[in-house]
Image (cartoon, grey):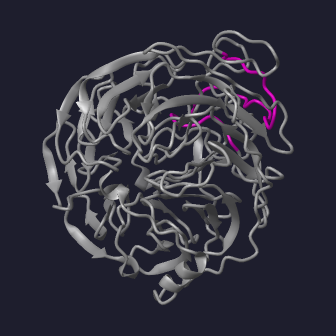
């Protein structure tokens, strides 16, 4: 596994604190945390199991079987019936009133209310449900995704009045991040299994969701098992739509993205250094096709068409080079407006440091937080302190930190992540104008306030590659939830769950969008119904976020005003 195969040092928290205590930034004392109730370790039998949280009803047990090389899918009705694919699981559990409109308005979202705010102490975590896959499919090490894929209310349509679904890749720990895995689709309210996809996929690769064929319903794009493989596109019901003719050589533990990069109304698929059309044909290949990557898409030059960012290089929609910074290797590009001009900047996370470049590739600065290497980790961008300016969150083996654009640390917290390159995310759970940071290290999912103080922690296990928790309203109840995954790659032990939905015990968190469709998610890249915009709104002109969620309001995106 190249660098991933290195020996893992399990570092005690005391040692970690000692390692970063003289960093010059404000360290965080991990005290007064709230932990989840104990989670039963299920799934030892032949079927996947879903365990509901204390206040959730409609818990379900799903099962699936596979035969032959192509496989088949089946599911068990959680109410006791059986037979066939189940797209109409009964509405139950933590599900609120259906929205007044079932389709997007104002080209982005459906409804929401940004006037509702939560108390500052609204951080009492509870497991809404936990899903455990069957033997050989108990572990997950990719970012979970959210979209509407099933007709839950039985009206013959799949829309925003249905319960969102959670897409999770579950497989075995065989000392590698490339073995065969199943792509499960779970009910967002209960965690019940709707179905799993008809073909096996790579365990460590993050799929992408979106409507690639203009039928109004999202498809799922993944990749075959192994360090390289053909792309696989699945219909919303898990059946195979197509398999690409060409192999993606940079597939290992990487991520797929969807965008209409040439703005012609047809969606393209970005996989490392390759761009495929919506039928799986290669449009062009350019740049370094590195492993452990997540290429991004943005309009950098202000001209028609979007640029594709591959490591430290950027290419126009037709594949011609826009610039090449010479920063290569396992590099994650992120896009936001990080200065006072109207153009976006690109923030590059490389192994040797963090690099900020202008939209045309001109260097701005480089630095190495705390002098610590191994920084090729996904960065998230948000206004963390309520000053109406973006900050960025970045992890390293011994710490997670949030930084001002001038590289000044806003805060730093001690973590344990010697095994990989995990990322974080953020969301304003209380609607107070400041985002809370969320980061998952090898043993714990942390939620921090704007000072770096721990608001809550959630136990899990992970050898960590490029995954991170996601935030979405997964059950249509008007309150957001956090999705957390577990695996034992490089860390050992026994997984407590494959994926878990975490909520505030009183469902006080404000409403987020009901979608998270890809690793490089930045809100404006996808409508809430899973369709991909032909002309994507520049996210840095409004939200100015990356890999974080937004609250929604009546057809628009809500940003509560800064305090005062």
Residue nearest the viewer, comparing 547 with 439:
439
In this rendering, would 497 be left or right of 337?
A: right
Main SS of the magenta segment? loop
Q: Is residue 145 left or right of residue 256?
A: right
Q: Is residue 106 magenta?
A: yes
**Residue farthest toward the left in the current orientation of the protein:** 320
Residue found 66% across the figure and 71% down from its top: 563
Residue 345 is a magenta residue: no
Residue at 86% of width from left, 43% of height from top? Answer: 55
517 over 311 or under it: above or below: above
Q: Residue 140 in the image: x percent, y percent? A: 54, 43
The answer to whether any part of residue 279 appears in the image is no
Instruction: Give the quarter of the image for residue 232.
Output: top left
Q: From which residue to which does the magenta span run?
A: 86-112
Q: Position of residue 253 (x, y in %)?
A: 38, 45
Labels in figure, total: 0
Image coords of residue 519 (percent x, y): 44, 45
Q: Is residue 34 visible?
A: yes
Query: Which of the image's four quarters has the C terminus?
Result: bottom right
> In the drawing, does residue 193 fall left or right of residue 34?
left
Q: Could you say which is closer to the camera, residue 411 or residue 498?
A: 498
Residue 379 found in image quarter:
bottom left
Query: Residue 541: where, in percent of width, then height?
Result: 42, 54
């Amino acid at each position: 596994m190249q660098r991933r195969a290195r020996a893992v040092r399990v570092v005690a928290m005391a040692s970690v604190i000692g390692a970063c205590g003289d960093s010059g930034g404000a360290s965080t004392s991990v005290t007064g945390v709230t932990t989840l109730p104990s989670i039963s370790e299920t799934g030892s039998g032949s079927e996947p199991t879903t365990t509901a949280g204390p206040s959730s009803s409609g818990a379900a047990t799903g099962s699936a079987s596979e035969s032959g090389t192509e496989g088949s899918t089946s599911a068990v009705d959680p109410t006791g019936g059986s037979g066939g694919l189940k797209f109409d699981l009964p509405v139950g559990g933590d599900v609120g009133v259906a929205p007044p409109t079932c389709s997007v308005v104002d080209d982005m979202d459906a409804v929401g209310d940004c006037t509702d705010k939560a108390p500052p102490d609204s951080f009492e975590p509870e497991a809404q449900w936990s899903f455990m896959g069957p033997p050989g499919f108990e572990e997950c090490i990719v970012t979970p995704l959210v979209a509407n894929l099933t007709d839950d209310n039985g009206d013959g349509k799949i829309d925003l009045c249905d319960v969102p679904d959670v897409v999770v890749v579950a497989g075995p720990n065989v000392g590698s991040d490339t073995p065969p895995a199943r792509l499960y689709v779970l009910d967002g309210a209960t965690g019940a299994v709707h179905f799993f996809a008809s073909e096996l996929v790579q365990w460590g690769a993050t799929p992408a969701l979106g409507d690639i064929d203009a039928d109004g319903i999202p498809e799922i794009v993944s990749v075959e098992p192994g360090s390289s493989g053909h792309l696989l596109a699945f219909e919303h019901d898990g059946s195979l739509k197509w398999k690409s003719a060409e192999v993606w050589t940079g597939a290992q533990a990487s991520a797929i993205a969807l965008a209409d990069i040439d703005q012609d109304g047809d969606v393209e698929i970005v996989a490392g250094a390759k761009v495929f059309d919506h039928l799986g044909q290669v449009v062009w290949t350019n740049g370094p096709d590195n492993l452990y990557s997540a290429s991004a898409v943005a309009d950098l030059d202000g001209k028609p068409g979007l640029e594709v960012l591959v490591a430290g290089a950027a290419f126009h929609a037709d594949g011609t080079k826009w610039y090449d910074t010479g920063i290569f290797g396992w590099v994650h590009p992120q896009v936001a407006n990080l200065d006072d001009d109207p153009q976006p900047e690109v923030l590059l996370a490389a192994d040797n440091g963090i690099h900020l470049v202008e939209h045309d590739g001109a260097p701005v600065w480089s630095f190495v937080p705390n002098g610590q290497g191994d920084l090729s980790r996904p960065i998230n961008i948000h206004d963390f302190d309520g000053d109406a300016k973006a900050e960025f969150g970045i992890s390293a083996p011994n710490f997670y930190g949030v930084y001002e654009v001038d590289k000044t640390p806003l805060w730093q917290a001690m973590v344990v992540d010697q095994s990989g390159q995990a990322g974080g995310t953020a969301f304003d759970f209380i609607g107070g104008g400041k985002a809370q940071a969320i980061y998952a290290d090898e043993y714990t999912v942390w939620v921090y306030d704007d000072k770096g103080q721990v608001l809550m922690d959630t136990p899990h296990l992970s050898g960590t590659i490029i995954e991170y928790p996601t935030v979405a309203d997964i059950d249509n109840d008007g309150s957001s939830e956090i999705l957390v995954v577990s695996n034992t790659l490089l860390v050992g032990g026994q997984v407590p769950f494959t994926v878990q939905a975490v909520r505030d015990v009183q469902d006080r968190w404000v409403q987020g969008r009901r979608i998270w469709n890809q690793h490089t998610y930045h809100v404006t890249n996808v409508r809430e119904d899973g369709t991909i915009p032909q002309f994507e709104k520049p996210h840095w002109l409004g939200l100015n976020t990356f890999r974080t969620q937004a609250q929604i309001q009546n057809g628009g995106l809500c940003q509560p005003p800064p305090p005062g």
